[in-house]
Image (cartoon, rainbow, N blue to C red):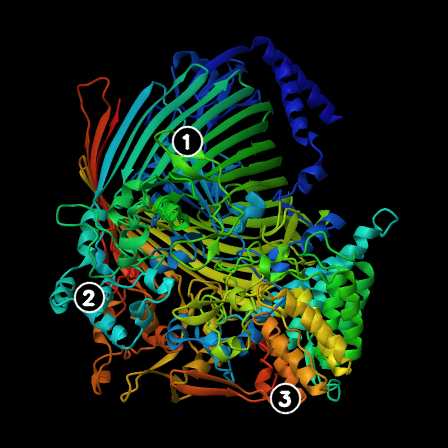
């Protein structure tokens, strides 16, 4: 009995030590947790459309709403301003000098989150070998990460850095360029030129790596990269370079959606989301759903009647883009089919970029051809379409800018246009009236650049703040 | 040469002895209680062999009749008996050492039993008598106010830590003390343990006592030991009690009066706040609810004033108190049988609890079964097996109590939710009445929300089944050396179901809002009709095994060695899954799985399109693995000097950490000197005096941080089906274990006959490498990060004094006084923290470490009264009175704020008096907590606009010049200024001392001891009352800090009986 028990005990003692120690300690604490190492992991990180494209319920993403909030596509009723806007958002609406009231500035946080995701992938790819078997995927993922980072940098620069001006870009402050996923990386602002140089370099690299068209429109593609380059160069007023990429972009696909096929009776006619919209090249929303209540949200804001009156009879956008609420005009044309604005890249924008570049290069016929092609797709087939024509250089440019104004409302593009067009002296002054008080945003006002969030400055006290 | 001769002589002698030896069996029992004494040492004086008694007190020894036996047992007087006498004696009786109470105690660390007089560490014990002094469903509740150094936070402070041993020494890792149940860490819900099965509790407070528990011991350890069969004859114990408690007092929550509310809403209405609702020219303005009074103002009937006056006369809290709350009744019944048959000791108990909580529709019941058996194969091998099974069910109905409508607008004070006949009335807090009256022209389901009916229509059922199996074998190799293995298996199954019946508001709401009404009036249902079910199941499986060698030996009654060494493995796997379904009907146990969760559908009550909510659907798996090696040893000389040491290494499956970082070595050393045993010491005045000290390192881990980037894998994105990975935590290459160095020095003393005895201890704790989630520069791409960035120190004092005031044959009076001082202070915090003062004000119970201050601290803006012209709040900054709320709130740094102090008590304790008169016993306990702060609520302007409720301070608002002399409540404006509110809310005006003294409870019992009955041993009937309220509190606001603007809990009365057969 005793001996037998001794054997039992020994066996039991040994059985404790039987399992492999390292396996036991390597067990994952949470089965769903993954330390990203493989191409599949990196692909899955970039496919987080919630963080990368602002899609879904807790949408984040690279496109700040601050620009649209300060633009002239909309106005608010006093009751909505008073009752439905947080103080910080009220400040955005009235172009207040110190707009932040201590609430988080998600317009900064979310785009930099995109940068962090992209950097995580770019850092991680350093440890993955590019082989004959995986290079297509490897390149696509690297290109996607570079695109995502460049896109976020571009978007941040539109609100947190001054407008690009070739003569001062070497001394104006850019945005902090975070280029690794390291926690210890030092954050600082370089010159604005540095910001744009980095954006262009990354996009050019990405354009060599990405496939022409994506499997899903939440992923970047060669076409998206060309489209974004065309937009970036336009923002920098480098219309030659912009033209090169607009052409490359439309060479891949220039199909427009015939608005006669759109059911304008719907409360949001573009059902199905921007990822399924025919003209969309890169699907993405403006941040703000539902973490921030932005004033330009389609179910709160109203559209000024002088803007609405720019659309001619026979222009289907009058019905597809606009509805009425309380007898006032409201917007319903988001390519995402919801109250929240589309902020990605679409073919119509590239048409307008190309037309503007042609107009500026005095290729008036080419400019008008693009405008008329676009307009025709928006025109009611039951009403004869009369193509626009002119021989006057300035008039053609004005036609193009007018069409740009009409086509690209609530796309997060107006702010950049206002900054750019006022730089060349177009003198656009914005007005708002709230509770009987008049607010004005003058051309080239320093308030066209938002301050860096206070918490960023508190972490980096030496960082220069934007003058307002 | 000499030694060889003596060896041969000895050898011969032994042979000679053995030649005449015989086997002897007997049993050792306690002289008074006649209960068997396990683990007593039986030493053969000449034969020099030692055996131990088993749990039945019996032993077997081969001895020469001419030899004699020395019986020793911890806490008992040594007895020497000649072997030949054994045959004549039925039992060997040992008398208790009466010299001092402290010395007889045995401490259970969960790994070993230690005699208290040789311990170097800091232990506190709660014996069965004290444990059962109070009545509760829960084990932990019975430890409140009876153990020095163990504090339970109540009131607002409970939002920080529920309970702590010697203060908090971590920032974000788990601060809860480790709970050990029958020698193994208990990972289940403590609610599962029936207090009736508990024998005693030991609290381990310092490094030496706790370090044996390793990585999880930095917060102290509570060792719970269940009852075992030890009595010779079978015993039956029956206990039963019922606890009553009155309805909570809702008037303790300050609310705006109905008349004030209507007045305020009239003001809002006249200011145009409800302009769009009145115009009603958008869908949302027609649907989104507005207060009932405003609806009336818009309708503007002829008898408007009359109807408003009627509303002003109503008080919703009367309805709520009457129909939503009730007196609570808790029942607890338990029966146990225990005994000892030759080689087997057994214990079986079963308990039943049923609680009807004060919120109508909420109940809890629990059945617990326990069986514990020890079997002795022979004098060397023992085995034990026990099982603990608990089944519990917590049910709550759709009863939001005072918080009706809190997800939307809250409750209007003038609303009625139940009519005079007791029927539930609709309450319009989501949609406007005119909209609901007309939408769908009767083709839809009823769309009204009746809070009272919801109590029955919505239910939340939480079922838990917990099984705990323990097995163990102990083998005695030779004198003093034993080996044991223990194994515990736990399986806890939990299922939580949230059910909305088909008639519940939520079910009807989802169905209605997505319904599509056709031109002919027919309805297409997009959401399946019926109710909904959200089910969350979880399973915890844990395996814990231990192999341990024990060595315990005493030489010449002078040298005493006690050591253990062992190896331990622990694995805990938690799995779970959740699903949500529409179309649920309990009656038919059916669901409707066909739901389109993808399409964006229009809704009837607003302009948006929405996907049908999909509820919570997921599958989870978590694994915690630990490997540990440990040693613990102590050597005592002549009952005067003791040194102790322990060493332990823990390794865990920390995620994304290199193997060499997965483990951490923990150790402690200690010494004790029993001064009173020194020959030079005069024992007359102080028969017992002992000084002891320890120093050691404890550890703590957090699963929150990772050295690598950690992502969470999901099946798809928001718009596509490709796998996605969301980044959960950024990389941290320098991740380490938290370390807490603890120094403890203590003094134990007892005067003659223990008239006055006690313990005083001082400790300090240096916690380094503390993990903390810290706000980061958002430019990094994440707003916070976990890192080993901080250090804290904690120091304090624990004292317990016991005084026997009167002791006579008929009357006893004893007083126990507990006092603890615990203070922590952040000493290092490397990561830059936002310097914005407001960060530290928003939530006092959030962790906002500031060097030099406690982890949880109260700060405020310095109040400077109301502006006499406008009634606006003013604060003082650098001697200047300011009202620029934006810059105060957004830019004012921490240094300009007023620091008040900790929000956790820093001084606390209790005073317990126990009286005995013949068969009566009476005791009461008074607790005190000092040196902490809390913040009271007031009326907030912006809250008044956004919510329909409001604080009673509204009536004290500034209205005209001169009011500032009598009130601190600012004027109420429209539109409201949230920052003006914040400056008022976070001002020093609202920070108060939370110090309080309260009468916790009293206990009165009578023991009925039948002299004639053979079977009935004792009946105890008792009455116990608790939550008897505050005797004193420091603040001038007249607010009991335990019930700061929450319903006041009434006192509890328990009646019960314990019957022993």
Residue bearing mark 1: B590
Residue bearing mark 2: B257
Note whether residue B98 is visible: no
Q: Earlier in the sequence, mark 1 or mark 2?
A: 2
- B926 above or below A425? above
Foreground residue, B486 or B269?
B269
Chain of residue at mark 3: A
- B659 above or below A459? above
x then y, percent, for residue A213? 75, 56
x then y, percent, for residue B319? 18, 52
x then y, percent, for residue A271? 55, 55
State which mark lies toward you, 3 or 2: 3
Chain of residue at mark 1: B
Q: Residues within 10 Å of mark 2 (few under 14, many from 20)?
A: many
Foreground residue, A214 or B326?
A214
Cα distance between the residues tagged 3 and 1? 67 Å
Foreground residue, B197 or A159?
A159
Residue bearing mark 3: A426
Answer left or right for A102 relative to A228: left
Q: Quadrant of the C terminus of chain B?
A: top left
Chain of residue at mark 2: B
Secondary element at image label 2: loop
Answer left or right for B25 relative to A385: left
Cα distance between the residues tagged 3 and 2? 59 Å
Secondary element at image label 1: strand
Q: Residue sitting at 19 percent across and 66 percent down?
A: B257
């Amino acid at each position: 009995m005793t001996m037998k028990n001794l054997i039992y005990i020994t066996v039991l003692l040994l059985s404790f030590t039987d399992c492999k120690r390292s396996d036991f300690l390597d067990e994952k604490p949470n089965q769903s947790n993954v330390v990203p190492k493989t191409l599949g992991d990196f692909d899955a990180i970039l496919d987080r459309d919630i963080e990368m494209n602002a899609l879904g319920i807790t949408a984040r993403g690279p496109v700040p709403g601050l620009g649209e909030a300060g633009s002239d596509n909309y106005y608010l009723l006093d009751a909505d301003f008073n009752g439905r806007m947080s103080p910080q958002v009220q400040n955005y609406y009235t172009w207040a000098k110190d707009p932040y009231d201590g609430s988080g500035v998600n317009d900064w946080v979310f785009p930099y989150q995109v940068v962090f995701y992209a950097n995580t992938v770019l850092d991680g790819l350093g440890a993955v070998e590019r082989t004959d078997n995986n290079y297509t995927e490897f390149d696509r993922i690297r290109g996607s990460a570079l695109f995502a980072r460049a896109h976020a940098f571009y978007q941040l620069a539109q609100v947190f850095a001054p407008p690009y001006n070739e003569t001062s870009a070497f001394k104006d402050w850019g945005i902090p360029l975070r280029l690794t996923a390291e926690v210890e990386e030092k954050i600082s602002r370089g010159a604005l030129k540095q910001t744009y140089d980095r954006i262009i370099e990354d996009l050019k690299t990405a354009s060599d790596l990405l496939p022409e068209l994506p499997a899903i429109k939440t992923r970047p593609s060669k076409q998206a990269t060309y489209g974004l380059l065309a937009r970036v160069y336009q923002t920098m007023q480098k219309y030659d370079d912009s033209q090169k990429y607009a052409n490359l972009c439309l060479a891949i696909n220039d199909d427009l959606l015939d608005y006669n096929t759109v059911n304008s009776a719907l409360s949001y006619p573009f059902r199905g989301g921007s990822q399924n919209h025919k003209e969309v090249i890169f699907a993405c929303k403006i941040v703000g759903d539902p973490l921030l209540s932005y004033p330009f949200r389609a179910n709160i804001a109203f559209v000024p009647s002088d803007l609405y009156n720019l659309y001619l009879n026979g222009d289907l956008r009058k019905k597809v883009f606009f509805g009425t609420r309380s007898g006032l005009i409201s917007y319903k044309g988001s390519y995402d089919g919801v109250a929240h604005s589309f902020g990605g890249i679409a073919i119509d924008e590239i048409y307008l970029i190309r037309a503007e570049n042609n107009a500026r290069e005095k290729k008036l016929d080419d400019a008008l051809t693009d405008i008329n092609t676009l307009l025709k797709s928006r025109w009611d087939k039951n009403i004869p379409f009369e193509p626009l024509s002119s021989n006057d250089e300035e008039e053609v440019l004005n036609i193009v800018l007018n069409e740009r104004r009409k086509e690209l409302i609530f796309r997060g593009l107006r702010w950049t246009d206002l900054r750019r067009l006022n730089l060349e002296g177009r003198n656009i002054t914005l007005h708002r009236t709230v509770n009987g008080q008049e607010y004005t945003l003058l051309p080239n006002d320093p308030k066209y650049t938002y301050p860096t969030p206070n918490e960023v400055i508190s972490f980096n006290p030496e960082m220069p703040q934007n003058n307002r | 040469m000499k030694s060889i001769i003596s060896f041969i002589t000895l050898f011969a002698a032994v042979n000679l002895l053995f030649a005449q030896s015989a086997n002897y069996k007997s049993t050792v029992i306690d002289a008074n209680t006649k209960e068997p004494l396990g683990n007593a040492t039986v030493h053969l004086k000449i034969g020099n062999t030692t055996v131990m008694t088993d749990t039945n007190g019996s032993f077997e020894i081969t001895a020469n009749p001419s030899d004699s036996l020395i019986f020793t047992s911890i806490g008992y007087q040594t007895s020497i008996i000649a072997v030949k006498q054994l045959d004549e004696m039925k039992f060997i009786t040992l008398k208790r050492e009466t010299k001092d109470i402290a010395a007889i105690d045995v401490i259970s660390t969960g790994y070993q039993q230690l005699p208290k007089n040789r311990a170097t560490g800091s232990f506190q014990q709660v014996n069965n008598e004290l444990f059962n002094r109070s009545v509760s469903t829960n084990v932990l509740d019975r430890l409140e106010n009876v153990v020095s150094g163990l504090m339970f936070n109540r009131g607002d402070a409970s939002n920080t830590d529920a309970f702590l041993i010697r203060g908090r020494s971590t920032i974000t890792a788990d601060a809860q003390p480790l709970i050990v149940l029958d020698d193994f860490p208990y990972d289940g819900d403590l609610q599962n343990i029936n207090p009736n099965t508990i024998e005693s509790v030991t609290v381990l407070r310092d490094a030496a006592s706790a370090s044996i528990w390793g990585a999880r011991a930095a917060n102290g350890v509570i060792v719970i030991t269940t009852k075992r069969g030890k009595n010779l004859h079978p015993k039956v114990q029956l206990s039963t009690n019922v606890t009553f408690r009155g309805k909570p007092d809702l008037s303790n929550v300050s609310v705006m009066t109905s008349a004030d509310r209507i007045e305020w809403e009239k003001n809002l209405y006249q200011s145009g706040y409800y302009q769009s609702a009145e115009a009603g020219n958008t869908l949302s303005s027609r649907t989104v609810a507005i207060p009932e009074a405003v609806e009336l103002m818009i309708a503007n009937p002829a008898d408007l004033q009359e109807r408003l006056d009627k509303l002003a006369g109503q008080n919703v809290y009367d309805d709520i108190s009457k129909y939503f709350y009730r007196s609570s009744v808790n029942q607890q019944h338990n029966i146990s049988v225990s005994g000892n048959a030759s080689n087997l000791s057994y214990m079986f108990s079963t308990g039943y609890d049923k609680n009807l909580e004060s919120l109508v529709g909420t109940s809890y019941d629990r059945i617990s079964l326990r069986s514990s058996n020890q079997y002795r194969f022979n004098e060397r091998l023992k085995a034990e097996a026990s099982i603990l099974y608990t089944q519990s069910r917590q049910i709550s109905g759709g009863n939001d109590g005072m918080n009706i409508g809190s997800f939307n607008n809250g409750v209007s004070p003038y609303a009625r939710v139940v009519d005079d006949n007791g029927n539930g009335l609709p309450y319009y807090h989501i949609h406007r009445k005119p909209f609901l009256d007309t939408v769908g022209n009767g083709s839809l389901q009823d769309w009204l929300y009746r809070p009272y009916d919801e109590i029955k229509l919505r239910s939340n059922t939480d079922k838990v089944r917990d099984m705990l199996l323990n097995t163990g074998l102990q083998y005695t190799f030779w004198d003093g050396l034993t080996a044991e293995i223990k194994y515990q298996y736990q399986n806890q199954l939990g299922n939580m179901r949230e059910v909305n019946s088909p008639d519940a508001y939520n079910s009807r709401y989802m169905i209605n809002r997505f319904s599509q009404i056709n031109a002919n009036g027919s309805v297409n249902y997009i959401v399946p009709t019926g109710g909904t079910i959200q089910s969350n199941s979880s399973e915890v499986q844990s395996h814990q095994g231990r192999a341990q060698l024990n060595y315990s030996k005493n030489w010449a009654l002078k040298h005493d060695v006690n050591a253990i060494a062992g190896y331990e493995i622990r694995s805990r796997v938690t799995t779970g899954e959740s699903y949500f379904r529409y179309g649920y009907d309990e009656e038919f146990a059916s669901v409707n799985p066909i739901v389109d969760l993808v399409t964006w559908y229009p809704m009837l009550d607003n302009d948006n399109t929405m996907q049908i909510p999909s509820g919570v659907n997921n599958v989870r798996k978590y694994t915690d693995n630990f490997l540990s090696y440990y040693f613990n040893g102590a050597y005592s000389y002549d009952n005067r000097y003791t040194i102790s040491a322990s060493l332990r290494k823990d390794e865990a499956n920390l995620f994304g950490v290199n193997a060499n970082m997965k483990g951490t070595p923990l150790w402690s050393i200690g010494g004790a000197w029993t001064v009173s045993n020194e020959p030079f010491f005069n024992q007359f005045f102080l028969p017992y005096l002992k000084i002891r000290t320890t120093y050691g390192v404890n550890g703590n881990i957090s699963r929150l941080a990772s050295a690598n980037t950690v992502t969470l894998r999901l099946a798809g994105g928001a718009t596509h089906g490709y796998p996605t990975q969301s980044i959960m935590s950024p990389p941290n290459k320098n991740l380490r274990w938290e370390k807490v160095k603890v120094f403890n020095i203590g003094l134990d003393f007892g005067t003659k006959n223990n008239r006055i005895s006690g313990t005083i201890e001082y400790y300090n704790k240096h916690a380094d490498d503390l993990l903390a989630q810290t706000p980061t520069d958002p430019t990094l791409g994440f707003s916070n990060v976990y890192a080993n960035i901080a250090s804290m120190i904690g120091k304090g004092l624990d004292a317990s004094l016991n005084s026997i005031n009167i002791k006579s044959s008929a009357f006893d009076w004893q007083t126990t006084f507990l006092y603890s001082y615990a203070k922590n202070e952040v000493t290092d915090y490397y990561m830059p923290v936002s310097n914005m003062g407001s960060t530290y004000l928003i939530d006092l119970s959030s962790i906002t470490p500031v060097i030099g201050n406690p982890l949880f601290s109260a700060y405020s803006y310095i109040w400077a009264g109301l502006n006499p012209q406008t009634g606006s709040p003013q604060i003082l900054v650098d001697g200047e009175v300011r009202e620029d709320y934006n810059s105060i709130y957004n830019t004012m740094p921490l240094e300009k704020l007023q620091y008040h102090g900790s929000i956790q008590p820093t001084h606390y304790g209790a005073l317990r008096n126990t009286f005995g008169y013949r068969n009566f016993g009476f005791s009461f306990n008074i607790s005190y907590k000092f040196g902490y702060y809390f913040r009271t609520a007031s009326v907030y302007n912006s809250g008044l606009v956004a919510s329909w409720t409001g604080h009673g301070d509204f009536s004290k608002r500034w209205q005209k010049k001169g009011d500032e002399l009598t009130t601190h409540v600012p004027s109420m404006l429209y539109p409201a200024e949230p920052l003006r509110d914040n400056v008022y809310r976070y001002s020093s005006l609202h920070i108060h001392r939370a110090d309080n003294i309260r009468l916790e409870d009293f206990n009165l019992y009578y023991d009925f001891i039948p002299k004639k009955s053979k079977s009935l041993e004792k009946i105890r009937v008792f009455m116990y009352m608790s939550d008897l309220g505050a005797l004193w509190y420091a603040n001038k606001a007249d607010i009991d800090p335990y019930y700061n603007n929450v319903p006041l809990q009434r006192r509890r009365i328990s009646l019960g009986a314990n019957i022993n057969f």
